[in-house]
Amino acid sequence: MQWIQAIILGLVQGLTEFLPISSSAHLRIVGELLPDSRDPGAAFTAITQLGTETAVLIFFWKDFVRILTQWFRSLTKKVPSSDPDARMGWLIIIGSIPIVVFGLLLKDQIETGFRSLWIVATTLIVFGVVLGIADAVAKQRRTLDELTPKHGILYGLAQSLALIPGVSRSGGTITAGLLMGYTREAAARYSFLLAMPAVFASGLYELYGALKESSPTVYTMPQTLLATVIAFVVGYLIIGWFLRFISHNSFRPFVWYRIGLGAVLYVLLGTGVIPA
């Protein structure tokens, strides 16, 4: 049964990581709805995210190679620091600082208190509404060529909110991008690029702890790795679909989905169907 549950959670992670609906919230909710009703845990979530972020790395491989190459060349003055790809390298670093700081400061809360389903239900609804407002009022004029260090930090602060399940890493950063006037495509693209350092660092840290302690999560290491592989395959397919979707559509379907899911979760918690 645990193998089947790991497969289901891997599918959930792959389907929800890049959509602005919070993969960590879905793993938390689905974990409670499975037969043995248990939280997969922050470690399981972080490790399976290695699968979806590997999908990002492969999908944007040419971009990453170009950015990394130009960033290193800017260090040796072979290209000017104003080079767009070199600048993007620095902006990804700058934007990653907030989540690293808050992740270290709030580690205990991330693994315990923040995982309350009451908090998840609330953040799903509140940040769904914020995303809807941002999408409605956004001017959508700016491209990533206009990204500044100040905006990079603001993106990073928005990403750090995703330490709370229900906020959504992509949802938080995309919302911030829209409010700063970036197009939907630009906001989503930078969201994917910005997530790489933090997610890989967190996932590898949890993986190290998993191998060191032999039993890091409620699932065995082989089960966790299977979920990670499934998340990679499904996530890779979702990236392309999501970028195509937002190029022609608003985020309204995701907004209503978040609000609906949060409302259903309130009912399930209030009636005692699932524990918080």
Image: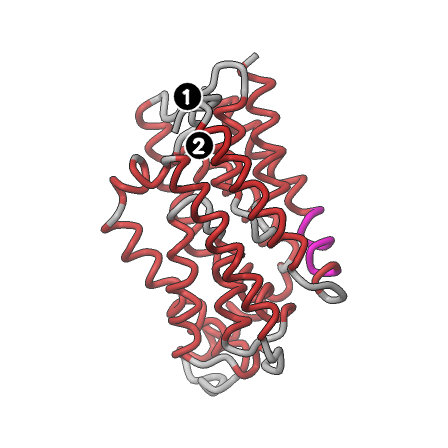
- Secondary structure beneath label 1: loop
Marks 1/2: CA–CA distance: 8 Å
Name the side, left or right, on which 93 lies relative to 243.
Answer: left
Label 2 sits on what residue type? Phe
Residue under the point 67% across and 40% down: 234
Q: Secondary structure at mark 2?
A: helix
Badge 1 crowding class, 10 Å Cα cut-off, few under 14, some 14 to 19, many 20 or more, is some
Where is residue 43, by image quadrant?
Answer: top left
Q: Is residue 242 magenta?
A: yes
Decide whether the magenta segment is chiefly helix, strand or loop: helix
Image position, residue 140 (x, y; %): 62, 78
Q: Which residues are magenta?
A: 237-244
Q: Which residue position is annotated with label 2?
A: 44
Mark 2: few, some, or many residues within 10 Å (few <14, many ≥20)?
A: many
Q: Nearer the viewer, residue 205 or 240?
A: 240
Q: Which mark is residue 218?
A: 1
User: Residue 123: horizontal and vertical position, in percent?
Assistant: 44, 49
In the rendered structure, are the residues bearing label 1 and label 2 in contact, judged by CB atoms less than 8 Å apart? yes
